[in-house]
Amino acid sequence: MNRLLSPEAKESLLAAWHRDKGLSGNALKMIACVLMFFDHMSQGVALNSLGFTPTYVVNDWGIPVLSGIPMPSLLATIGVLAGRIAFPIFCFFLVQGILLSGDWKKQIQRLVLFAFIAEVPFDLGLFGQVFYWDHQNVLFEMALGAATVVGMKKILDGDRKGKQAYAVLLFIAAAVLAEVLKFDYSAVGIIAMVLFYLACNDRRRTMLMGLIGFFFEAPLYGTVYLSLPLIYQYNGKRGRGGRWFFYIFYPAHLLALYFISLII
């Protein structure tokens, strides 16, 4: 079997995140999907055609300023800022999912398959073009991040001398590849996923890694950090809902936004 964790290690990881109350994994991913929808609606062609264009000006201290802009643009900007919460949640569950999966190869294959399926809807929904080569959708980033976690895990669990150096080299190569191929979050997305992997067995260290890993979006009013209290509430349970919903939702919502833009 293509498992990364032994049954004992799997139980240990789940125990580290167990709590009697809190939110299931699927509940958190559903929250992230809703926020991602508003983010893409605000950034994409659907609302832009009505003048709802996100507008924030970064001042000399690196702080975005919203004042003095029309209400439609303000609403679109709020949608974009709220959308910052989604990516950390997806990164966290990407790492959890790949570690807990009974077959990591199939999981990566599904990510790659839906990345290709989603690319045209992504280009249409966000850029209004059938092919937009300067920006690839986030599922490519997630697939590369998953492969990086798998590779680092296998290297670090092995007996090879200097394995830490090999793991670092793999991490750097993945970050460079994400930049070259212009994946959605490029190198910083790979960094964030690897940081979550390094802290996967500890709730508080995961919060710390989240603060560091998503610092690149902190200037946008710090809304990205609102994801961390939500992740902290994870109770170690999958929750109700099928795994395929989240794969299908990504290309489906982008295609829906493009069709909305044609109607309005």
Image (tube, grey):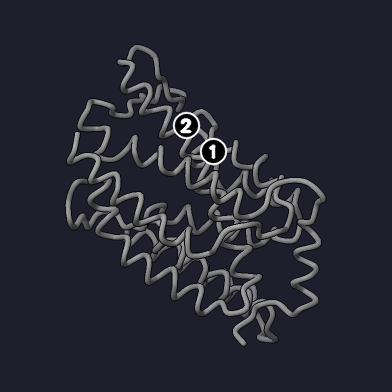
Q: Residues within 10 Å of mark 1 (few under 14, many from 20)?
A: many
Vertical relation: 85 (above or below) 205: above
Amino acid at pointer 1: Val
Q: Mark 2: few, some, or many residues within 10 Å (few <14, many ≥20)?
A: some
Q: Nearer the viewer, residue 249 or 232?
A: 249
Instruction: Return the mark for residue 258.
Output: none
Q: Residue at x 34, y 34 (%)?
A: 42
At 41% from the left edge and 60% from the top edge, which residue is drawn? 248
Position in image of residue 61 (x %, y %): 46, 24
Most distant residue in the top direction: 68
> Do labels 1 and 2 touch, CB within 8 Å?
yes
In which quadrant will I find the C terminus? top left
- Tag 2 secondary structure: loop
Mark 2 is on which residue type?
Answer: Leu
Q: Which residue lies under the disc numbered 2?
A: 220
Picture coordinates of residue 233 (x, y %)? 71, 45
